[in-house]
Amino acid sequence: MSQLRVRVEEYDFIIKTYGPNGVFNITPYINEFLREVNASKGLLVVECMGSTGALLLINPKYINEIKENELWTLVPVNLDWQHEGNAYAHLRSTVLGTQIVLPVRNSSLAIGDNKLYFIENQCYTFRERHIYLMYMGY
Amino acid sequence: MLDVKTYDFNVHLNPWQPINITPRIVDLVRSVRNGIVNVFTPSEDCAIITIEYDPHLFNDLRKYLEEYLKVRGIRHLTSSILGRCITLPIVNSSLRLGAWQQIILINIGEDPKEAQIYVTITGEG
């Protein structure tokens, strides 16, 4: 184990989204933050605030299929839901998740060929979404 | 200096009963300025999720799991799909949850449960 002191660094940013089925690659913003704080190795917690968005770690080669087909199948928009208007968006958010913990190595996410996407499930244009980052490591 | 704090407690849950544990977690993270909190349940058929606290939405969630997924052959994966834990940032001694976003413990099994909850907080005091 390293004798360096473990530290905590935080950052948040806003992205403007549209949806439903808007997919936004937030990996570059995260890696820029990790470079700025010189995060050599540790863990990063990523959270998207709100109960209708979602985070998705996936290889970009699948993202169009997910966007065009699989998100619609995952939770259908209309199934006589009781919650009015946007139940499907809440359920997608709960199933896909709004937070993720990822490994950091050499000032970038160690996620291989994957990217981290924010998924906009709501029927909106230019919605502001807050993303919170909390890094813990050397 | 980083510190690790743990809090373990039990919650009794009837089948499909959602319990909003957000106030308890919000209270616990006040002791840390910046860090992370992990909330985990090892209890079978229980899940910890973030969702709006609305009885209609819980009915929709039940319908989604018991009807939509079940007819597609998904029965035993449901607690894994929902997840047994969440990990959230703590910023200035508070969580960054949306206006409607709550941390919910839910029993998706057919029997009452005494669910165990393990809260682990790591951060700067």
Image: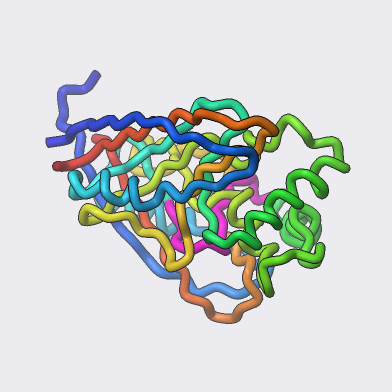
| Left or right for B28, reference B109 | left
The answer to whether A78 is drawn above or below residue A105 in the figure is: below
| Picture quadrant of residue B38 | top left
Q: Is residue B112 magenta?
A: no
| Residue for point 44% across, 61% down | A49
Q: Is residue A133 visible?
A: yes
Q: Quadrant of residue A126?
A: bottom right
The number of numbered badges drawn on the structure is: 0
Which residue is at 34% across, 37% downward?
Answer: A106
Between B50 and B8, the one lying in front of the other is B8
Q: How is the image coloured?
A: rainbow
Farthest top residue?
Answer: A1
State left or right for residue A17 relative to residue B86: right
Of residues A116 and B88, the one nearer the viewer is B88
Q: Locate the C terminus of chain A by quadrant.
A: top left
Q: Is residue B9 above or below residue A107?
A: above
Residue A92 at x, y percent in the picture: 65, 56
Q: Left of A9 or right of it: where is A42? A: right
Magenta residues, start to end = A47-61
| Direction bottom: furthest residue | A125
* Residue in the picture at 57% in, 62% down: B54
Image vertical order of residue B13 relative to residue A29, above or below? above
| Residue A38 visible to the viewer | no
Asked if residue A59 lies in the magenta stretch, the reply is yes
**Residue lying furthest left:** B1
Residue in the picture at 65% in, 76% down: A123
Q: Position of residue B115 (x, y in %)?
A: 49, 30
Q: Position of residue A73 (x, y in %)?
A: 80, 55
Find residue A1 and report its horizontal and vertical position in percent: 24, 18
